[in-house]
Image: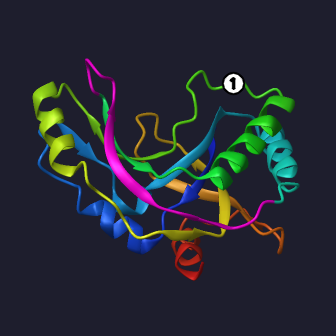
């Protein structure tokens, strides 16, 4: 059963900027560049009929395309860090899109995510790191900033890896700006082509 979540894809130029943050942190398992994404709403393991209902409801989202900029780094788990991430500069359009998807999920009875939405791109998962090493890494990369990019669509992704970190498959895609039709049931090898075409 696939594990589903809605997300924004990270375009190639921004992903290359993120890839420069790899390395220099013992115990880090770095996310593959092609698996970078920004999760909007974790949905979880759902049956096929529920996945169809969610996709059908997401068809009704009408939001404008917007600019997004990746900036800064941080870690989850202050005393026992378990992941490092790149942050996102404040974006009202991003927050509005996420809030609408959240409302749709709640209406459909998808269990709520106990974590508050904190927009980020996971860079690495950590296994028993030394907190001092993590602090040094964050300090060395704290001024990270990438060029802004246009967000032209959001996607429904799946993962069959229980550990996290990919591989991720784009199942459906919805354009922003309220124009065009969604792309359904993309095979795994087409997701990269679509990412490049955006």
Residue 9: x %, y % from top left: 54, 61
Identify which residue, 162 or 11, lies in the foreground.
11
Q: Residue at x 55, y 73 (%)?
A: 195
Of all residues, the one furthest to the bottom in this rendering is: 197
Residue 3 seen in the figure: no
Identify which residue, 33 or 63, lies in the foreground.
63
Residue 198: x %, y % from top left: 60, 78
Q: Residue at x 19, y 25 (%)?
A: 128
**Picture quarter with the N terminus:** top right
Residue 165: x %, y % from top left: 40, 45
Highlighted magenta segment, given as a residue range: 63-81
97 shown above or below 27: below
Q: Is residue 40 left or right of residue 88?
A: right
Which of the 4 quarters of the picture holds residue 13? bottom left
* Secondary structure of residue under mark 1: loop
33 shown above or below 164: below
Q: Badge 1, how many Cα within 10 Å: few under 14, some, many 20+? A: few
Q: Is residue 96 left or right of residue 116?
A: right
Asked whether 69 falls inside the magenta stretch, the response is yes
Identify which residue, 29 or 96, lies in the foreground.
96
Q: Which residue is mark 1?
A: 112
């Amino acid at each position: 059963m696939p594990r589903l979540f809605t997300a924004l894809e990270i375009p190639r130029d921004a992903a290359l900027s993120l890839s420069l943050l790899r390395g220099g942190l013992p115990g880090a398992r770095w996310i593959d560049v092609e698996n970078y994404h920004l999760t909007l709403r974790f949905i979880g393991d759902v049956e096929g009929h529920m996945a169809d209902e969610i996709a059908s409801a997401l068809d009704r989202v009408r939001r404008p395309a917007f600019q997004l900029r990746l900036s800064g780094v941080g870690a989850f788990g202050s005393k026992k860090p378990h992941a490092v991430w790149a942050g996102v500069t404040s974006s009202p359009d991003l927050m509005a899109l996420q809030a609408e998807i959240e409302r749709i999920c709640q209406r459909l009875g998808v269990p709520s995510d106990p974590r508050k939405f904190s927009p980020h791109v996971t860079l690495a998962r950590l296994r028993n790191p030394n907190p001092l090493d993590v602090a040094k890494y964050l300090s060395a990369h704290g001024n990270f900033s990438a060029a802004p990019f246009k967000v032209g669509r959001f996607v429904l992704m799946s993962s069959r890896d229980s550990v996290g970190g990919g591989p991720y498959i784009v199942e459906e895609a919805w354009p922003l700006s309220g124009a065009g039709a969604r792309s359904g049931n993309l095979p795994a090898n087409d997701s990269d082509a679509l990412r490049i075409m955006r």
